[in-house]
Amino acid sequence: MALAKGLRPVQVFGVILFVRIVSVFVVQTWYVPDEYWQTLEVAHKQVFGYGALTWEWTKGIRSYLYPSVVAALYTILKFTGLDHPEALILLPRILQAVISAFADYSFYQWTGGRKWALFLALTSWFWFYTGSRTLLQTVETALVAIALSKYPFRDGKTSYYEKESNLWIWLAVVCVFVRPTSAPLWVVLGLYNLATATEPRLRLVVRTYVPIGLVAGGALVALDSYFHGSLIVTPWEFFRFNVLHDIASFYGQHPWHWYLLQGIPAVLGIHLLPVVAAAAAVLRRPKENKTGALLLVAVAVHVAIYSFISHKEFRFVLPLLPIFLYLAQDFIVPWSRKAKKWQLYALAGALLIGNAVPALYFGVVHQSGTLKVMPLLRDAIPSNKSSIVFLMPCHSTPLYSHLHVNVTTRYLNCDPPFNKIGETYEAEYFFNNPQRWWRNEYSAKATPSLVVLFDTLKGRLESALQGYTLLHQIPHTQFPEGEVGENVLVYKKIDRQPKPDEAV
């Protein structure tokens, strides 16, 4: 555990950055569609003029802030002639790795430079798995970590007239626009600061909170309104669609206790043990650990609110990770001062191995096929007049951000039924009867040059594929589920050769 001992700040940051950059090249698997469809695809369409936007962008529930950062990177590549597909894929991830590294260093500073804190952050399997992905939750988590490192925890009496002490408020506003889901955390922390500040509360609100909210929020409203084409407040639209109209439940529903019994344990992995021990210690002596108590209240409010929203995902827990790791290190550090050397090495080894196994499996093996297929499709495209159809669950692969070829593509639509609940959407219609869909789709137009599907569909689409030859079979997962199969299959249309008597 001598990793941080004797290292200067630049060396500590170098170690963190090295781990995050390594994750860019180690983690080569598919996680969720939003990594591409809510960032890279949007940026690609902004810069190169062709691409696809999901319903979230037509309805205005997403901010253009993060995609615009990626778009700036793409613009540089475009005008320097370096916009190769590999660059379009790798550079945004490297940029995100740098942002995540800065967040890790901020977390390290927040703990007072504790080596256990650094160790926990660098070994967290889920952060290694997501920290270099271009997910909005990854940016949200980075902003949470940086803001918490600037938040005045110790006495709650830090003067808000000092420029540096206001930074967390600016970051909180930006964080809510990137992902409004972090709002409960900032409400709890904001109320606590108002309750413990030495300045009159009304003056603090009027002179600090309101101006920062208006300037930062106004700038982001202007940015989003410009790109969306009309005045829009994206956090409100997000709340209106996903909460008031419960559109999110269309993508899956879970019981209220899912985060407690599945979401948080899976994200923390073996780190769950010190986190639970830390929470128990704080609850036993809350007055002696005001920071820990405040963080637990913030987590409890956040989890309680989202437990009663029916749609749940593991990545929605990610912004809580800096808080969980802070609590864990705050418990481990006092214990480590009394522990024997073998106990320290045993704990460090258990945490390292317990995180390395899931990080490597999920980052290297599980769901790798839908990414590996993209360069193969680029090589298989005979010309710009070619067409590709993806007969897979919605958004199972990236698209133009990985192809970077302006070819015709077709994928199954799965927009929520805005007008009629229970309405059958295209993907559901397709999987109910693939042959019927194929006949209806291609009865009056040419069939596609390439067909991409999972092997579970092969038998149900056999007659339609008679004019095709299997080009690639790519391993995807050892745990197929539903319409997601073990392998990704690529079929290429057979060129019809003229008969001798047809030759000119």
Image (tube, rainbow, N blue to C red):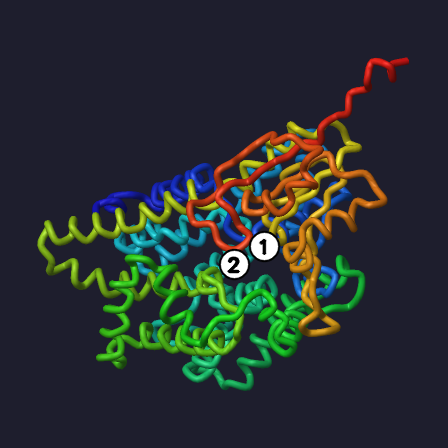
Is residue 42 something that shows in the picture?
no
Q: Are marks 2 and 1 in contact (CB under 8 Å)?
A: yes
Q: Residue at x 35, y 74 (%)?
A: 296
Check the picture and name the quadrant holding the C terminus. Answer: top right
Disc 2 versus disc 1: distance between alpha carbons? 9 Å
Which amino acid type is marked by label 2?
Gln
Q: Is 214 displayed left or right of 185 in the figure?
A: right
Q: Residue at x 28, y 57 (%)?
A: 270
Looking at the image, residue 362 sits to the left or right of residue 498; the answer is: left
> Badge 1, how many Cα within 10 Å: few under 14, some, many 20+?
some
> For the residue marked with disc 1, what is the amino acid?
Asp
Q: Nearer the viewer, residue 64 or 263?
A: 263
**Where is residue 13, by image quadrant?**
top left
Direction from residue 149 to residue 236 in the image, left or right: right
Q: Which labelled disc corresponds to residue 137?
A: 2
State the residue at coordinates (40%, 61%).
321
* Front residue of this view, candidates 380 and 161: 380
| Image coords of residue 20 (percent x, y) | 42, 44
Q: Position of residue 305 (x, y in %)?
A: 48, 78
Task: Return the residue at label 1.
Answer: 34
Residue 453 seen by the camera = yes
